[in-house]
Image: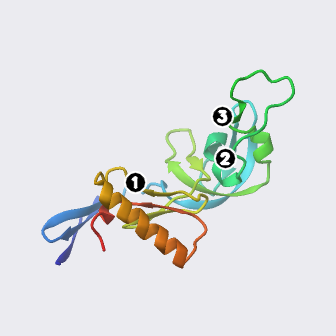
Amino acid sequence: MSEELLVNVTPQETRVAVIENGSLQEVHVERTSHRGFVGNIYKGRVVRVLPGMQAVFVDIGLQRTAFLHTSDMVAQRGEKNLPAEKGDTRQNVSSAPPDIVRLTHEGQELVVQVVKDPIGSKGARLTTQLSLPSRHLVLLPGSDHLGVSQRIQNPEERDRLRQVLNDAMRLNPVVGGFIVRTVAESVE
């Protein structure tokens, strides 16, 4: 197996390509004028709770405070569903996200990940559902989900990868979930 790493640097951007056996495997482009924050993980502090919007603003050290909606923080907090309150006539109360006031308060520290860069006067969009991607796996620290990329369509290969993942988890238990990425198809 032959691997090549091609790098092209210009004043405006840096491009990196990974070639395996003559086939393009990965391409990364980083522009010097705009280095985004998406994927960055921060320890932030809640500076404002907005019950009407079911959201909070979090100071993560950028120019503007970042926005975190309750639907993006439920998984890490572990409070998946709230019971119906007395007199509540809604059919499926448990599908509604928990009240933001029950999840967080001003001054609370949260570990968050940027999912959308700041634009104009708006701050970055955040989530507490962290994901740490690598070449073959994505680690989901706040989850117990074990999955295989849906782009891997061969059922035998999907089963094999699930079994490899389950065996690895039995040998070396890790707190968190994993998703096997498409590039892991046919990897031994």
Q: Is residue 101 left or right of residue 173?
A: right
Which class describes the residues within 10 Å of circle 3: few (<14), some (14-19), or many (20+)? few
Q: Which mark is residue 95?
A: 3
Image-based side of 79 in relation to 161, left or right: right
The answer to which of marks 2 and 1 sits earlier in the sequence is 1
Residue at figure coordinates x 37%, y 60% from the top left: 159
Residue 29 lies, with reference to residue 81, above or below; the image says: below
Q: Toward the viewer: 70 or 186?
A: 186
Name which of mark 3 and mark 1 comes first in the sequence. Answer: 1
Residue drawn at point x = 45 percent, y = 68 percent: 165
Query: Is residue 1 shown left or right of residue 65?
Result: left
What residue type is disc 1 on? Answer: His
Amino acid on which disc 2 is placed: Val
Q: Is residue 77 visible?
A: yes
Q: Nearer the viewer, mark 3 or mark 1?
A: 3
Q: How is the image coloured?
A: rainbow
Looking at the rendered image, the quarter that the C terminus falls into is bottom left
Local SS, label 3: helix
Three-letter code for the amino acid on which mark 3 is drawn: Ser
Q: Which residue is mark 2?
A: 74
Closest to the camera, between mark 2 and mark 1, is: 2
* Badge number at residue 34: 1
- Farthest residue to the left: give it: 22
Q: Decide: is 128 above or below 139.
A: above
Q: Quadrant of residue 135?
A: bottom left
Horizontal arrangement in the rendering, residue 170 relative to residue 22 (left or right): right
Percent of width and height locating residue 91: 70, 24
- Residue 80: horizontal and vertical position, in percent? 69, 45
Circle nearer the N terminus (3, 2) = 2
